[in-house]
Image (spheres, rainbow, N blue to C red):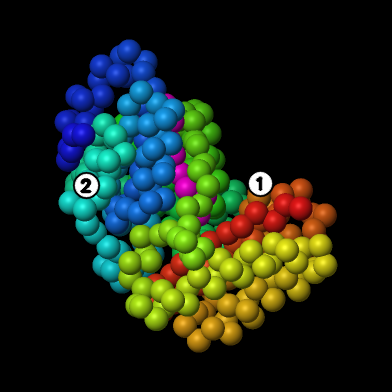
Amino acid sequence: MLIVHTVTELQQLLQSSVEQKKSIGFVPTMGALHLGHLALARASRGQCAITVVSIFVNPTQFNNPDDLRRYPRSLKQDCNLLLATGVDIVFAPNESEIYPQPDRRRFHFGRLDKVMEGKYRPGHFNGVAQVVSRLFEIVQPTHAFFGEKDFQQVAIVRALTEQMGGRPLIIACPVVRETDGLAMSSRNALLTGVQRAHAPLIAATLVRAQAKTATTSVAALRQWVADTINADEELEVEYVEIVDERTLQPIAHWHDAQHPRLCVAVYAPPVRLIDNIDLKP
């Protein structure tokens, strides 16, 4: 496994693979890796001739400076974890490599980025689009792997890829969970011991909600999820939405979407956790 820090180094390493039209799998991350990230890396290894994992904490997607400051960074540990997956290249650039000039581009995604994360984190998805499009330009992957924990982000990246000409192929991989159900996230490392003990309630509530769709209205289920999580003194709901999986727009009735999905954002202050579950019957 090679670790490189500059665009020039990376592109030199990939040049022959690009010329030979080999499949290049790409897993963009912000580091603080966990088993969910490693599952993405292994998925890429299983489908592509070359796998590149990037580790870069992207400042343009943080609308809260404190959140950026708190975000965990552990490059050495991350590389040790990736070594066991068989990844070919780790790309760990600094900010000037990704943004040699300030990135002032503005992206438009219709209604996809106006709800949920987009509503509560203004500018977040524009920052995601900036860094992902820049990384795609640098790496020139044929396939890119993203986790469904960030379900809305996957939809945004797919829309971005369409705007960029349809490449790379976006592969969405299932949420990877701890044994107690908590969705794996780099932010989990920031939870206190008490918060970590209470956080699995989020996933448990989603699973229970899944079983209630046949007997509960959309509005009543949303309220039940919010009330159940908020009843825990360590947790505070930011949003609960039931949306059409394709458009990400909120639905009022079950017949409004063939594939409804329940999405939540919850604070275990100051840590913010997100999760989602498929509600298809």
Q: Which mark is residue 80?
A: 2
Q: Is residue 139 magenta?
A: no
Q: Percent x, y for residue 148?
A: 52, 49
Toward the top, the furthest residue is 20
Mark 2 residue crowding within 10 angstroms, few (<14) / some (14–19) / many (20+) = few
Instruction: Answer whether labels 2 and 1 touch (C-beta < 8 Å).
Output: no
The residue closer to the viewer here, 58 or 231, is: 231
Could you tell me if residue 37 is visible in this image?
A: yes
Residue depicted at 49% across the width and 65% down the height:
180
Mark 1 residue crowding within 10 angstroms, few (<14) / some (14–19) / many (20+) = some
Of pointers 2 and 1, the one earlier in the residue sequence: 2
Residue depicted at 61% across the width and 57% down the height:
277
Left or right position of 227 against 28: right
Q: Percent x, y for residue 274?
A: 50, 64
Measured in 3D between alpha carbons, the distance from the residue under mark 2 to the one under mark 1, in whole angstroms, is: 37 Å
User: Which residues are drawn in magenta?
Assistant: 140-149
Badge 2 marks a residue whose secondary structure is helix
Badge 1 marks a residue whose secondary structure is loop
Q: Which mark is residue 246?
A: 1
Q: Amino acid at mark 2?
A: Asn
Q: Which mark is residue 279?
A: none
Residue depicted at 73% across the width and 63% down the height:
211
Q: Amino acid at mark 1?
A: Arg
Residue depicted at 66% across the width and 46% down the height:
246
Left or right position of 248 against 165: right
* 137 up-or-down from 224: above or below: above
